[in-house]
Image (cartoon, rainbow, N blue to C red):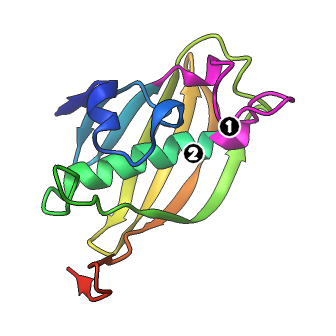
Amino acid sequence: MITLDQAQIRARLPHTGDMCLLRAVSGCDARGIRCVADSHRLAANPLRTAAGLGAANAVEYAAQAMALHAMLQQPDRPQGKGEPAAHGMLASVRRLVLHRPRLDDLVDDLSIRAVPVSLDGQGALYEFDVRCAGQAVAEGRAIVLFPARQAVDGIGVP
């Protein structure tokens, strides 16, 4: 079972500064990933608007968890250390259910879970849910694509 702190997460995700929303990975294996976040309470959260932090932003929390899971489960894919990481792109979100209108009014940490339904070198289908104090905040399914890396001269690199 893999666990990571925020510094280890930041070393793996392309998100910098406050845009790295996750605080920790509490568990990760082939069956899925569980993460913890408290950034929804930050006034400086980059997703927050004058109206607050809408619950639809839970998708970004889940997407970051999915990206971490895919990287950790496919260690042969580049993950930094001198080579550009092979980052995924969120292609589709389906069956999204938001159980509340906002995230910024939640006092407790968010618990994010992502479970792969299908995962290969080209992309992944995940089911995800975001909870707070045991209560559902958001849930759905997402497709993440892993575009082929491009070399400097434009020739694809496997």
Residue plotted at (41% across, 24% down): 23
Residue plotted at (29% across, 24% down): 5
Is residue 54 left or right of 22 when viewed as pictured?
right
Assign a secondary structure to mark 2. helix
Of the residues under marks 1 and 2, which one precedes in the sequence?
1
Query: Which image quadrant is residue 53 in?
Result: top right
Where does residue 102 sit, x and y in percent of width and height? 76, 29
Residue plotted at (25% across, 38% down): 28
What amino acid does circle 1 point to? Leu
Q: Dot 1 corresponds to which residue?
A: 47
Q: Indicate the quadrant containing the N terminus: top left, top right, bottom left or bottom right.
A: top left
Residue plotted at (48% across, 32% down): 17
Q: Nearer the viewer, residue 24 or 137?
A: 24
Residues at discs 1 and 2 in contact (Cβ within 8 Å): yes
Q: Dot 2 corresponds to which residue?
A: 60
Q: Which residues are drawn in magenta?
A: 37-57
What amino acid does circle 2 point to? Glu
Q: Compute the Cα span from label 1 to label 2.
A: 9 Å
Query: Which image quadrant is residue 10 in?
Result: top left
Where does residue 111 sit, x and y in percent of width and height? 48, 27
